[in-house]
Image (cartoon, rainbow, N blue to C red):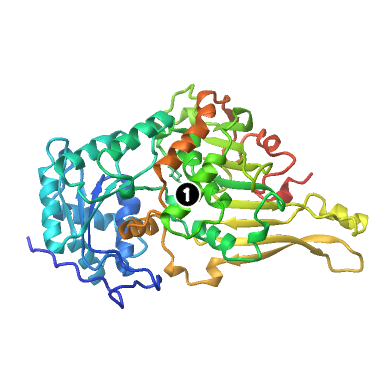
Amino acid sequence: MAQPAQPAPAPSPSPTTGPGTDTEPLPADHVIVLFGATGDLARRKLLPGLFHLARAGLMPGRYRIVGTAPAAESLTDEEFREHARQAVAEFGRAQPEGPAWEAFAAGLSFGAADTGAAQPLVAAVRTAEEAVGGSPHRLFHLAVPPVAFASVIDLLGATGLARDGRVIVEKPFGTDLASARALNATIHAVFDESRVFRIDHFLGKEAVDNILALRFANGLFEPLWNREHISHVQIDVPEHIDIQGRAHFFEGTGTFRDMVVTHLFQLLGFVAMEPPVTLEADALRDEQVKVFHSMRAVDPAHVVRGQYAGYRAEPGVDPESDTETFVALRVEIDNWRWAGVPFHLRSGKALAEGRHVVTIGLREPVLRMFPLDAREAADGRGNEIVIDFADPGSITARFLVKEPGPSMRLAEADMVFAYRTSFAAENSLEGYEHLLLEAMRGNQALFTRSDGVERLWEVATPLLDAPPPVEPYAPGSWGPDSIDALVEPYRWYLPDRRDHEP
Ligand code: BG6
């Protein structure tokens, strides 16, 4: 079989900067090792994401990608290239063709690895390093189920592959405080914390960086961001999809562990943090972890767990399952900025829409100067800042204006900034792409840290120990009815707060 061409140097206009990044350096040369290379995550996100980075000129000048899996699922190099080609064709933004694909595919190889029998992988990594030349960085991506984390870490330690390498660990990071601590101990036995990149793909979304920009780059917003001016905050991530056949995973996990302890709490850290001294990883994560330490433990009385009608009939689900497919909760942050400001969080499957929305509810000013009917029109309509972090996302400021006409009546108006109409969206990276790039750059700012992860499990413990029973809800709804009482005297902003009015 003909040898594939060598990967061409990255098609970057300059050796040190990539398009769309202006000032950020390209990552140093790398050998990336993908554990779980034949699995779902690699197929849907990682292989298409790496190819997109290559097309965007954001991969290192020289790199190789080594796929690995147990020997029972071993592929030849050629089969792995074909596997990657199909993955990119199905899930990528650009088709796997032309010189860009040829160059990318030429850098793919495969080496199987089992505990005690990792020789094919070790040989493949060595060959890849020789092809790159010099001393490339090693980056291991553990796209494997949590049960396999420890054995892969042990394998990396035992073979010496781990030396000077970095490791990306997928979620879920433990299922409670004890398991998270045990997993951290296993990882730290081989990789010190500065080389560990715990991935939460929500932190790779543009809007997370944009929360930092909105809050800390604007005199317009920064002075408002505290309990003096903000009455409540909502972090709302309803999903339209159901469990999509993932009964095995879901039954053992549930929405609280799958979405809240991970994605929603991480977002909360960014919405609520104090200004970091810099955007460097340590400074940023110190502030985020301080928020987690200020959080009160979750009170089960402030939690609604739901389960969509029909869930128990899904193949693989226990007919008496108590697993939640929905959760809404109120959490409190007991610090000087946020004391007394409730944070309402919601996420669930099979809901009416899939959305990602953070709403900041601002306190109402005194309306006495307005005539009575104007005040009635304004009743309950405080100002809001709504951050919709769908890709590409938008930010809306909602406020009151005078309705045109002879009388003084107040009405709501929106000031909308939409990424789609404001910037060239082709420069944007999908969450995983952004995080893979940051891991190659060695920047941990958008990755979770061991102390933060453990603290979040600690906060979650009262709920895990005594969960309230699940309440049923209709697929296509916004969750069980009792969620309205949970947020009183406020209201859920989705689907649209106007729809909630009597
Ligand atoms: C994953 C969860 O981490 O995030 C899934 O395991 C969920 O259950 C997904 O559907 C949501 O991610 P996104 O980016 O599509 O909102």
Q: What number of labels is visible?
A: 1
Horizontal and vertical percent position of residue 485: 70, 35
Between 414 and 169, the one nearer to me in the picture: 169
Between 428 and 217, the one nearer to me in the picture: 217
Q: Which residue is mark 1?
A: 286
Residue at the bottom extreme, as displayed:
13
What is the quadrant of the N terminus in the image?
Answer: bottom left
Horizontal and vertical percent position of residue 188: 30, 40
Type of amino acid at the residue the image marks with label 1:
Asp
Horizontal and vertical percent position of residue 258: 45, 38
Horizontal and vertical percent position of residue 412: 76, 60
Between 309 and 291, the one nearer to me in the picture: 291
Residue in the picture at 27% in, 35% down? 150
Residue 67 in sight from this viewpoint? yes
For label 1, the SS is helix
Q: Is residue 375 left or right of residue 230?
A: right
Residue 240 in sight from this viewpoint? no
Residue in the picture at 54% in, 27% down? 462
Within the image, what quadrant is residue 93 found in? bottom left
Task: State whether label 1 is within 8 Å of ligand 1.
Answer: no
Vertical order, 352 against 46 (above or below): above
Residue at the top extreme, as displayed:
320
For label 1, the crowd category at 10 Å Cα-Cα, with few meaning under 14, some 14 to 19 and many 20 or more, is some
What is the quadrant of the C terminus in the image?
Answer: top right
Q: Is residue 107 left or right of residue 491?
A: left
